Amino acid sequence: MIIDLDANATYAPTEEIQGVIQHAWKRLGNPSSLHRGGQRARAEIEKAREAVRRLVGAEKDDLVVFTSGATEANNTALDAGWRSIAVSAVEHPCVLGPARRIQAAGGDVRIIPVNAHGAIESTGLVQSLTADTELLSVMSANNETGVENDVEVLGTLARKVNPRILVHTDAAQSLGKRSISFTGMGVDLLTLSGHKIGALSGVGALVIKHGVAIRPLLLGGSQEYKIRGGTENVLGIVSFGEVAELASETLAARIDAMSAARDAFEDALSQAIDDCEFNGRAAPRLPNTSSVYIPGALGDDIVVALDLEEILVSSGAACSSGKPEPSHVLLAMGQGEDRVRSTIRVSFRADQSVTLVPRVVDTIARVVSRMRVEGVLK
């Protein structure tokens, strides 16, 4: 049996969600069409929109704009004509990329440092802002380490520097793993990804506070409040709505299950490999994520060896796999390249039991022991 411990990369749809998708595929048309198939599709999209709105605690006047995923949502939030922005050093590449483009065009881009645990500190934030900073973008939780930021507090500090600043947060990893309140966080823009909680790949959302004007990234038709032109991904949106509804109903149980599995894993691995270390463990973290430094073995080699044992983990962000550069997240935390290259990420699903932990830990320990012996022999 394959054990998939790469939930932060993707969370495959359950059989129940697959059934919903198959049913929708047979009866739904283009949501812009006036015929019954089109109107059924439009109704399903609006139903999904409300389910996502409820899951993230947005008000009825706030906009939930469906996109092709978190990358498009983040690009839309950042590619809005800003002249001065601040982003954290550990943001996802789909935030850092647009930030670099703004900088290349002559804009003022400030990079907010993180501490050794991967968290943004108030001093570093305030020192990175000016009275002219128009947008602050800080992720609610990191995709590699699971380290969380108190976005509400950071936003409050930012508005003391510039009361007119807008605050954006990439909450793709927090969705379904923490209770999210768009209103309570005090943000203006919030990014979501559907496949992180079991929807089809290729669907996400940008939540926009009522009254905030955003320049469209994609120009075309009048879909999605004229902010995201193009025919909607109906099946993806339907799947997003279904998993959002389910997550709303079961969030507390999901968090408990993920926490139990992750904590059991870290306790057992500490016993099996006594010199391993967990990145960000001293900071608030998502309940499912474990970033593990294992001396004497390369992370990529561990990933390949575990794959042969039918255990799936990651050596970093899935979108960066295959790239020779070490993790920018761990480097920003002050870690050396050798340590960074000896780190793996293990991330649990809510439907996984602690009973799988012994097999996972025993296999990792066996693989690492073999690698260490081979390394000595070389």
Image (cartoon, rainbow, N blue to C red):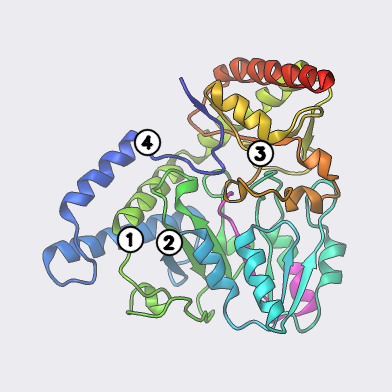
Q: Is residue 184 magenta?
A: no
From the viewer's side, name the closer residue of 210 and 235: 235
Q: Is residue 291 visible?
A: no
Point out which mark residue 211 bears. Answer: none
Report the span colored magenta.
156-173
**Label 4: which residue?**
14
Q: CA distance from mark 1 to mark 2?
A: 8 Å
Q: Which badge, 1 or 3, comes first in the chain's sequence?
A: 1
**Label 2: which residue?**
68
**Label 3: which residue?**
315
* Amino acid of disc 3: Ser
- Asked if marks 1 and 4 touch (Cβ < 8 Å), the reply is no
Residue 86 in the image: state x and y as whole percent.
73, 71
**Label 1: which residue?**
233
Q: Which badge, 1 or 2, comes first in the chain's sequence?
A: 2
* Amino acid of disc 2: Ser
